[in-house]
Image: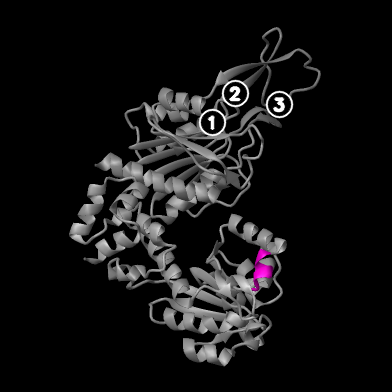
Amino acid sequence: MNKISQLISLLGGTGFVAERLKIQPSAISNWKKLNKIPSGKREAILELSSHLDINIEDFLPNKIFHDIKVKMLLIICGGIASYKSLEIIRLIKKTDIELDVVMTKSAQKFITPMLVTSLNEKKCFTDLFSIEDETKMNHIKLARKPDIILVAPATANIMAKLANGLADDLASTILLASFSKIILAPSMNPIMWSNLATRENHKKLLDRGIEFIEPNTGDMACGEKGTGRLQEPKLIVEYILSYICKNQYLENQFKDISILITAGPTIENIDPIRFVSNKSSGKQGFAIASELTRRGAKVTLITGPVNIPFPNCESVIKVTTAQEMFDSVTQRLPTDVLICSAAVADWKFIPKTSSNKKIDINNKIKKDNKNLLFETKQNPDILGTIAKSNLRPKIVIGFSAETNNIKKNAHSKLISKNVDLIIANDVSNDKVFGGDFNKVCLIDKNNCEEWEKQSKNSVAFNLANKINDLLTNFNQ
C-alpha cells in the first residue's frame, strides 16, 4: 500500500473522504493510484487529518516542510508540565523554524533558563525589566518578530491575563503587543480547566481568533483524573507543522488573481452638515480583503467612510458617495473576482419646497423651511450593472442584508442581478452592523448553505475557500 492509500485509509476510507470533500470517489481512487494529492486539495486533507494522531509529514511530499521560513516564539508558563516544553524545543530544532523562547518566573521554578538556552542554542528571555534587553526594546521585537507564538504549557493564569488585557510580565506583554498567530496549549488541574472563569476566558480567546491545542484527559500529577493534561509534545509540534503547511500553501492560493472588493457604507449629503447613510462598519469587507491578500491575491479595496484600520492589501481607494464607488469600480475593471460587500445608499435625497422650489444644498437648510420635501434619485446599481456588462469578472459575489424572507429575497437578488453567489444575513436584530460576528447564508442558483454564527474573520476564511472552489470550477 502506498503512502496516499495509507493516509486515505486512516482518514476513514475512499467513500468517507470523498463525501467530506464533496468530490467523486473515483477522484480519490486516482490519487491513490498516482500516490499524489492535488495541490488544490491539500488544505482540505490537512483539515481532515488535523485531529488524528498521525504525522502528516509521513504522507505528504517532504518539500512542504523544507525551506520553511517561519519564526516562532515559545512561551513556557509555570506548571508541572513545563518539563515537556524541553521536548517541544528539541523537536522544533529538527525543522528549519527559527525559535525564540520566553519563560515566566513560575516556569523557572520547574526548569532553568540555562537548560533552555543550552537546548535552543540561543538566549532564553525571562525579564520584562532587564536593562540589557530593554535598551533594545526586546519585548516589542519579540512580539513583532514571530509568525507564530506557541504558549505551552498555557496556565489558567496566562489565559486570564490575555483574555482580560493584563500585561504585568514579559510573556503577557508580548502576547498583548503582538500581531502574530497565537496558539495556546493549556495544562492545569481538571477543576481549574472546568471552572466557569476559565471556560469564559477560553471562549473569549476563541472568539478573538486565538487557537487552542485542547488539553488531554487522563491521570494528573496532582493525583486527580480529568481533562487538563498538556498534549504530548509530538502532537503539539505536528499541529504547528500542519498549521504552517496549510498557511504555506494558502499564501499562494490566489497568486496572480486580481480581486476587487467594495466595503463600508456610502454617504449621500443633503446639505453640508446632514447626510443619508447606514450603519455598516466595513468590518466584514475588510476581513475578506485581509484574508484574500494573505492568500496571495492582488486585492483592491474600495471603501466608504469607516473608522477601522485598513488592511494591508495592494491598494485601498477611499470614496464617499455611491457614484464615486461606482466610478472607482468601473475604472478598475477588468478583474478576476468582484465582491460587493459595501452597503451602498440606494438613493440621493434632494430637498425641495412644497412649491417645487429648489433649495441651495451648498448651504445649511434652515428650520424655517417648514414645507420641506425630499425627492429621491436612485444611485447606480454597482453589482447589477457590472454583473451584466461586457467587463463582467469571472466570479461576481454580492451581499444581501435583509430583515425578512432572507433566503427568498437573496435568491431573487441573485437571479435579477446575474451574480454567482449571494451572501445573505439577517440585520433585523441590529447586532450585525458594527459587530465582530456574522451568521450568513451562501446562496447560488442551486444551493443554500447556512453557516453557523462565527467571527467575521472566520466568515472571510471560509468564503476564501468557497471562492477558490468557484475559480477552480470556472477554469475547468
Question: Please, is residue 60 above or below residue 386 in the view?
Answer: below
Q: Give the side of residue 38 with respect to residue 389, left or right.
A: left
* Residue hosting label 2: 348
Comparing 327 with 200, the one in front is 200
Assess disc 3: are there few (<14), some (14-19) or many (≥20) residues with their C-alpha within 10 Å of its C-alpha: few
Q: Position of residue 72 (x, y in %)?
A: 48, 74
Residue denoted by label 3:
363
Which circle's residue, 2 or 1, is located before the other in the chain?
1
Amino acid of disc 3: Asn
Return the residue nearer the eye: 343 or 364. Answer: 343
The reply to whether residue 396 is visible in this rendering is: yes
Choose top left, top right, bottom left or bottom right for residue 349.
top right
Name the residue tied to disc 1: 322
Foreground mark, 3 or 2? Answer: 2
Q: Residue at x 45, y 69 (%)?
A: 240
Is residue 190 highlighted in magenta? yes
Question: Residues under labels 3 and 1: Cα distance?
Answer: 22 Å
Q: Main secondary structure of the magenta part?
A: helix
Q: Position of residue 97 (x, y in %)?
A: 42, 76
Q: Secondary structure at mark 1?
A: helix
Q: Bin the neighbour count of mark 2 within 10 Å (Cα to Cα): few under 14, some 14-19, many 20 and up.
A: many
The CA distance from mark 2 to mark 1 is: 9 Å
The quadrant of the picture occupied by the C terminus is top left
For marks 3 and 1 on the same chain, the one whose residue lies earlier in the sequence = 1
